[in-house]
Amino acid sequence: MELFRDTNFDFLKWKWPFIGASLVLTVVGLASWAMKGGLSYGIDFKGGVEMRVRFQNDPPVDQIRKALEQKIKGEITVQQLVATGAPELLIGTEIANENALNENRDVIVQSLRGMFGEAGDKLDLNNSSTDDLANLLRGKSGVPAAEEQVQSLVKAIGDYRVTKGGLLASIDELSGVPGVNPSVIQALKENGSVSKFTVRSTDVVGPKIGAELKSKAVLATLYALGGMLIYLAFRFEWIYGLAAVIAVFHDTLITLGLFSLTNREISLTVVAALLTLVGYSMNDTIVVFDRIRENLKAGSRQSMTDLINASVNQTLSRTILTSGLTFLTALALWLFGGDVLEGFSFALVVGILVGTYSSIFVASPILIFWQDYMASRKGGVAQAAPAARVSIEKPQADAPSAEKKDKKKVVRR
């Protein structure tokens, strides 16, 4: 499918405005980076506790954040998960050391219980372990006395709770669980309660692991760039590889600068997006470079600028179709994907835009600058050589004989 045929746009006429815009974005991003003391990293890299909590009704996000900020030091993140089909929050807290891990988790649970649970010391059935539930039932009137029967009853209640997404609306709904008789329901009501939330999962990242993840993320990006440089140097010429890597590095730097300017955090999902962009932008650049190489092999007598313009025009339909559709997908993720995917999708949206124009207005001009540089060097040598060619003949006092004329030599230096 071709959207455009026989186009003849002078793309490189606009190379300097785009290069200027890139320089401005890079400088502004680096300045923001320096003023803020570096990029803002998420809990994945700094270390912390991240809990996924489900609620019966839409939770008051701001109220929960304020309650936690009063009890826990450091950064608090409360993000609403909109793609799960149920009201859920992702609550994260920064930690200073390993000892604060369990402490922060307990504070979060107790704070949520104070807001969404029943007062008193009753066991919260929505956030209790199987051992806690077994201890509650042991020795109660009407509850089987055998330990095997108690464990079977606890397992049946736990399995039912899983089918409800871990969240019981009331204790009475357990009456349909096998083995749960009215005496068991009565015991649960007297000693337990159901809160309006449940902790679905808890992920803990220590500060040391976070620092290791950060260094590995940087190395992964650099290794990807280095590997692609080597690949392009073998497939094309080293200058093609260098131009492509500079363009990809340019894309990554501008994307990170925009993250700093907009106060967005760098998480593992963002690193995944950046690595995706490295491959995507490199592929886009290779398509243009491959067409340039084909036109050079065809023996085109055009100037390098005209040849690159022709190559970009020939691949224009492919660029618009692939970049356009990928951009629309990333934009949909950014607009409708929710807070959890916001950083990932933002990196994709920015990276696709920057990566598409860098293939044309950053990578391609590098080839022109290099050719002009090499031509100027060859031209300098070519102009200096004739000046050194001086013909010298040995003077003769008398008229030379025919034999001497034949033996006359012209010395050049």
Image: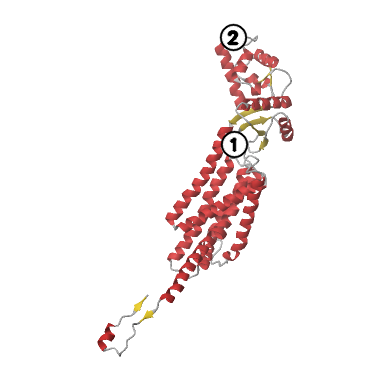
In the rendered image, which residue does mark 1 sit on? 44
Query: 10 Å neighbourhood of mark 2: few (<14), some, or many (≥20)?
Result: few
Which residue is denoted by mark 2 in the rendering? Answer: 145
Q: What element does badge 2 sit on? A: loop
Image spot of residue 230 (x, y percent) = 45, 51
Residues at discs 2 and 1 in contact (Cβ within 8 Å): no
Q: Is residue 224 left or right of residue 23?
A: left
Residue 106 at what x, y percent from top left? 66, 25
- Counting residues from the start of the chain, the first of labels 2 and 1 encountered is 1
Judging depth in this view, the residue of 137 and 281 nearest the camera is 281
Residue located at (45% from left, 73% from top): 384
- Residue found at the very far left of the displayed protein: 403
Quarter of the image for the C terminus: give it. bottom left
Q: Residue 33: x, y in percent?
A: 64, 47
**How far across and how far down the image is residue 169, in percent?**
68, 25
Describe the element under mark 1 as helix, strand or loop.
helix
